[in-house]
Image (spheres, grey):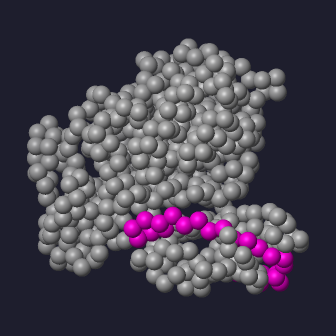
Amino acid sequence: MTSWTRRRLVAAGVTIGSLLAAGAAFALSAPSAQALENGVARTPPMGWNSWNTFGCNINETLIRQMADAIVSSGMGELGYKYVVVDDCWFNPNRDSSGNLQGDPSRFPSGMKSLGDYLHGKGLKFGIYQVPGTKTCAQGTGGYPGATGSQGHEAQDARQFAAWGVDYLKYDYCSGSGTINDQVTTFAKMRDALAATGRPIVYSINPNSFHCCTGPQRNWGDVANMWRTTEDITNKWDTGNTNGYPMGIQNIVNITVPLAGNARPGAFNDPDMMEVGRSGLSDTEQRSHFALWAMMASPLIAGNDIRSMTSATQTILKNANLLAIDQDSLALQATQVSNDGSRRVLAKKLANGDVAVALFNQSGSTTTISTSASAIGLTGSSFTLRDVWSNATSTTTGAISASVPSHGTVVYRVSRTGTPTSPPPTSTPPTSPPPTSQPPTSPPPSSSSPTPPPATGTCRISDTVSAWNTGLTSNITITNTGTTAISGWALAFTLPSGQTITSGWNAGYSPSSGPVTARNVSYNGDLAPNASLTIGYQATHTGNAAAPASFTLNGASCTVA
């Protein structure tokens, strides 16, 4: 959360102790072997959150207007899909069955209706909750009630799924508990969400009122994204190392060293963006956005989309930076050098290019230099694409620019002779999630059993989302026969030039040409008229078509 002058002491009643007692059956530290692989957030989530601009002053009219603006501005088709309703949406009282309710004056149509509206716009529904008894706003007296999830985790997760929620922001909002206690607490909701069968991006903040455990571990076994610092504010440098509030420079200093944590489905979260709000110069806002993209950060806008200036749109809709952020490798940039004033970051990309950021942390214009070899490229000739001007130049290896104070120059660097990806007209969306997912996605057996004989008939629906040199394919398999299928193998042939790089809800072998996708341990049974969804991410060399035909256990399927 951001805004207000937050009290550093937890308000009475906002504790986690009794919650931990209730969850004592959980291990104090979730083992890293149980990594969260829930099929969502294969690239950093993108969207908008209500808190930075509106705080508690929200209602359904505002959220619907913001959704309309996201679509009409073109941000939706660029990947800004998640519309997250932050704190203060609650009815201060649960109903007689203990269920959460939307505030009747703020959200008179109800939260499911709001979710339906967002889905009808092609967007996704995000919502806010906490693991204690009171939300951050309730704990500081800014909002009435005590509607946290303590003692209601499974019930609240089911309610979110029933409302069509696609993204949960889960904010610690308590000063009590060790980091292991926090792991136990956050894991409880992780597992409750998984048990609903609905794919929901799980975003946690372990730092609120509890500074600062975010950077102390890799939270990828617990959540899809986790805050690395205390809350952001619209300033460049607040002077805080990791305390409330944090400026852009302060957050970068904490988050850059955590690069090893990032991977598909798991991302460091440096907080919602301040682009388009007062307090930062245009140069600083461009740096803010560029650095978030280089760090493979979730790109969650926090401005008023309805009244964006052209300058704000230029930043938030920069296709080159969006492609860098959403690159399918999902790697965070690593630090090449930093002398206190001049910082160089490099981010490896799926097609072999490397994005390099020349970041001036000083108070005056300076020249920042590095080389192709320093960022991991070999060769004698390279093409540099400036992400802001889109201009290209060539070099034998030197990479250098004059960078204004607090500015960041970003180049996409490729070996000359290697086709560079043109700036996309839209960026790849976060890989659409499966229709059902357990707490973790175990890999398929190394020796998959021979599939059973053909049983019944089947229907396939294959949705392909493509960009530049990559694509995602989400395949829904429906058993249209009258007999249950127990154990399945789906065979298809990838078009020439396509190679699978990752997948979910199935094991894929081989990665190109004729491919067989086999069930994993949790989805081998398919009842008559039932469906399941599997998917993969792949590279392509120009042909992003879907496979032409499919067979399930040897029987041909109808392609919808």
Q: Is residue 443 shown left or right of residue 396?
A: right
Q: Quadrant of the C terminus?
A: bottom right
In the image as oriented, which residue stretches furthest toward the right? 482
Residue 333 is inside the magenta segment: no
What residue appears at the point 45 percent right and 59 percent down from the top-left corner? 428
Q: Is residue 223 shown left or right of residue 458?
A: left
Q: Is residue 183 shown left or right of residue 205?
A: right
Residue 449 is inside the magenta segment: yes
In the image as oriented, which residue stretches furthest toward the front? 72
Residue nearer the viewer, 352 or 8: 352
Q: Residue 31: percent from the left, percent from the top?
A: 63, 53
**In this view, 315 is above or below 445:** above
Q: Residue 313: percent from the left, percent from the top?
A: 32, 42
Residue nearer the viewer, 329 or 159: 159
What residue appears at the point 14 percent right and 70 percent down from the top-left corner? 395
Q: Is residue 510 visible?
A: no
Residue nearer the viewer, 31 or 140: 140
Q: Residue 393: percent from the left, percent from the top?
A: 15, 66
Q: Which residues are magenta?
A: 443-471
What residue appears at the point 42 percent right and 52 percent down from the top-left corner? 78
Q: Is residue 326 visible?
A: yes
Q: Residue 244: percent from the left, percent from the top?
A: 40, 27
How many marks overall? 0
What residue appears at the point 42 percent right and 39 percent down from the top-left corner? 301
**In this view, 384 is above or below 315:** below
